Image (cartoon, rainbow, N blue to C red):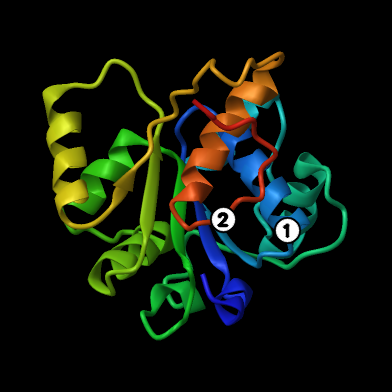
Amino acid sequence: MQANEQLLPITLGITGASGLIYAVRAVKYLLEAEIPIELVASKATYQVWKAEEGIQMPAEVNAQENFWRQQAGVPDGGKLRCHAWSNVGANIASGSFKTQGMIIMPCSMSTVGKLAAGLSSDLLERAADVQLKERKPLVLVPRETPLSLIHLRNLVTLAEAGAHIVPAIPAWYHNPQTILDLVDFVVARALDQFDLDCVPLKRWQG
């Protein structure tokens, strides 16, 4: 990756799939590496925060930056801009807005299905559709099990369209000691798709 490309932001989409910790850790490592983030959380994300963590995610976009920084443990440093899921006129909705690409983590099967069908009912889906049409990296981290035949076919459709499918499946060869070690493995592999090595990870040496 060229030096000037390092300044381009990563679009981080967060859906209502279980596993918001993946998004939190991605925010942490991207901010610490001073890689700008354009963040959009789907409408269902609010419900998942309440169900999984008992936390009310603020609806106001201006309050969301502090919320994500607090969850990630990075109160300052780096650039983070949050967008409302309903704001389909935001910068990331246009192919003329330059980014390194987009990660959707975690990615629900509902989102996978809509993207596979070419539907864009909110900003997150529109931003992802833009990556595909512009042939920019789109990384999906699906968090579902088991997968139905419909799920599998939708994932194949997106892979054929150019998306990178990085399931939330950790490895054990790096000798994980905590749950966060397992989470960070998945985050690192997702960021590897952009050639970003900003997550401390014991990699396979053979």
Identity of the residue furthest to the right in this view: 75
Against 164, residue 181 (above or below) is: above
Task: State the residue at coordinates (47%, 80%).
Answer: 98
Tag 2: amino acid: Leu
Q: Is residue 28 visible?
A: yes
Tag 1: amino acid: Ala
Where is residue 46? Give x, y as percent.
58, 40
Where is residue 136? Give x, y as percent.
34, 68
Against 39, residue 149 (above or below) is: above
Q: Total of numbered circles in the picture?
A: 2
Disc 2 element: loop
Where is residue 131? Give x, y as percent.
33, 67
Against 54, residue 138 (above or below) is: below
Identity of the residue furthest to the bottom in this view: 96
| Residue tagged 1 | 33
Residue 90 vs residue 139, the one in the foreground: 139
Q: Are marks 2 and 1 in contact (CB under 8 Å)?
A: yes
Residue 161 falls in which quadrant of the image?
bottom left
Q: Residues within 10 Å of mark 2 (few under 14, many from 20)?
A: some
Task: State the residue at coordinates (18%, 59%).
Answer: 118
Where is residue 39? Give x, y as percent.
58, 59
Q: Upstream in the sequence, badge 2 or badge 1?
A: 1
Residue 75 vs residue 34, the one in the foreground: 34
| Residue tagged 2 | 196
Task: State the residue at coordinates (28%, 15%).
Answer: 146
